Image (cartoon, rainbow, N blue to C red):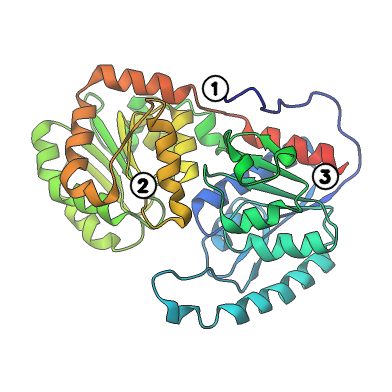
């Protein structure tokens, strides 16, 4: 099936004059925050007079990342349902009620012409209140399996932007527009060479390099496998760029740093250089990780996070595996199978080329512009 047949192409017609006010709500992880910022940047590029306000959850990474990108953000007191401890959910109803009062104050003061939700639990009260006030709302659903909040919001949304086909089972078909997922310009338009990347990470240009990324918080199964096999990496003549994530980062950083063939830290700010330096990748399969790997055309072994809502990371990875564009190892099998899978891929040039070709065919590099133009066209 042609995944591009329903994709909206960027409009070339001039846009209407006059400034407008836009709220972008959501966050919690980089997979929500970076697409939100990419959409905001595209809107500002098309309409420099746009007034954009972000709304996120207090204490979450959007409260730091959004201001660094040059945008104002308002925080609300909201939390998601804790699946690991029911006791921790006792205060949840009170937080939800409080968040609606906070959202009411923000929206009434800012008076947005439209609201965009990018996922994360902070998006729900913002879009729900906007819908009650008949303000146009737009949803960006990055995953192959839609979240419950987005499904509820989708019934009254103006338009719904999705990454791939088959989303009619979650949303009204007439509202869906296939745009792909927005990718940071530094990645989508990267011109970094492997030589430059290796100099940046202090590694050797002529050695096969593995990039291991488990998201901003980290992936225990991936980190444990890397920690156990760093000596073997050296013996095999392989190098490792290793993002541990914030959780228990110190132990993994101490494990990796004595080895000259390992660059290790809790976070990689320059992901364009990490992708440029990598021959093969180990990654979780959150929507944005998948999208960035498609754009970067990297052979990858996915290790889906097994406790993601509706197991959407497995759905994301399986979509690529079914197209012979990637490999997948279950989180429960990582100890037994992951190191063998990634090292075999690192030394299999034919498989790498097949994966590069097939994963690159799934890439959409201008999703941010497609979404921005559709929002602007609808509002003005």
Instruction: Tell me where residue 148 appears, x and y as whole percent.
Output: 58, 57
Element type where label 3 sits in the image:
loop
Q: CA distance from mark 1 to mark 3?
A: 40 Å
Q: Residue at x 91, y 43 (%)?
A: 18
Q: CA distance from mark 1 to mark 2?
A: 25 Å
- Badge 1, how many Cα within 10 Å: few under 14, some, many 20+? few
The residue indicated by pointer 3 is 49
Q: CA distance from mark 3 to mark 2?
A: 41 Å
The residue indicated by pointer 2 is 304
Of the 4 image quadrants, the one containing the C terminus is: top right
Q: Is residue 330 left or right of residue 336?
A: right
- Which residue is at the far right? 17
User: Which residue is at the front of the view, 288 or 48?
Assistant: 288
Instruction: Tell me where residue 256 appears, x and y as whole percent.
Output: 19, 50
User: Which residue is at the front of the view, 43 or 94?
Assistant: 94
- Which residue is at the far left? 235
Element type where label 2 sits in the image:
loop
**Number of callouts in the render?**
3
Whichever of callouts 3 and 2 sits on the residue coming sooner in the sequence is 3
The answer to whether marks 1 and 2 mark residues whose Cβ atoms lie closer than 8 Å is no
Whichever of callouts 1 and 2 sits on the residue coming sooner in the sequence is 1
Of the 4 image quadrants, the one containing the N terminus is: top right
Q: Is residue 106 left or right of residue 324?
A: right
Q: Residue at x 62, y 51 (%)?
A: 118
Q: Is residue 186 left or right of residue 71?
A: left
The residue indicated by pointer 1 is 1
Q: Is residue 333 visible?
A: yes
- Badge 3, how many Cα within 10 Å: few under 14, some, many 20+? some
């Amino acid at each position: 099936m042609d995944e591009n047949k329903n994709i909206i192409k960027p409009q070339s017609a001039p846009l209407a004059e006059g400034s407008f006010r836009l709220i972008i709500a959501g966050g919690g992880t980089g997979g929500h925050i970076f697409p939100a910022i990419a959409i905001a940047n595209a809107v500002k590029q098309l309409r420099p007079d746009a007034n954009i306000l972000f709304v996120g959850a207090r204490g979450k990474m959007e409260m730091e990342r959004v201001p660094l990108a040059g945008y104002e953000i308002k925080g609300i007191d909201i939390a998601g349902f804790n699946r690991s401890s029911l006791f921790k959910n006792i205060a949840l109803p009170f937080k939800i009620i409080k968040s609606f009062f906070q959202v009411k104050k923000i929206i009434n003061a800012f008076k947005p012409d439209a609201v965009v939700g990018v996922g994360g639990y902070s998006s729900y009260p913002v879009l729900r209140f906007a819908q009650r006030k008949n303000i146009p709302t737009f949803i960006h659903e990055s995953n192959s399996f839609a979240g419950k909040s987005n499904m509820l919001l989708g019934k009254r949304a103006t338009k719904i932007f999705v990454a791939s086909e088959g989303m009619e089972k979650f949303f009204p078909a007439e509202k869906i527009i296939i745009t792909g997922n927005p990718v940071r310009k530094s990645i989508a338009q990267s011109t970094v060479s492997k030589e430059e990347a290796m100099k940046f990470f202090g590694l050797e240009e002529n050695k096969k390099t593995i990039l291991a990324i488990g998201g901003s918080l980290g992936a225990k199964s991936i980190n444990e496998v890397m920690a156990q096999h760093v000596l073997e990496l050296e013996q095999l003549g392989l190098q490792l760029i290793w993002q541990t994530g914030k959780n228990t980062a110190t132990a993994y950083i101490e494990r990796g740093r004595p080895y000259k063939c390992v660059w290790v830290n809790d976070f990689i700010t320059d992901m364009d250089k990490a992708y440029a330096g990598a021959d093969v990748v180990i990654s979780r399969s959150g929507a944005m990780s998948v999208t960035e790997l498609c754009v970067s055309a990297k052979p990858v072994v996915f290790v889906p996070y097994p406790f993601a809502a509706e197991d959407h990371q497995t759905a994301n990875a399986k979509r690529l595996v079914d197209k012979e564009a990637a490999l997948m190892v279950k989180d429960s099998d990582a100890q037994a199978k992951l190191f063998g899978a990634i090292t075999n891929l690192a030394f299999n040039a034919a498989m790498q080329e097949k994966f590069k070709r097939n994963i690159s065919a799934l890439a959409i590099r201008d999703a941010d512009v497609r979404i921005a133009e559709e929002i602007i066209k609808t509002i003005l």
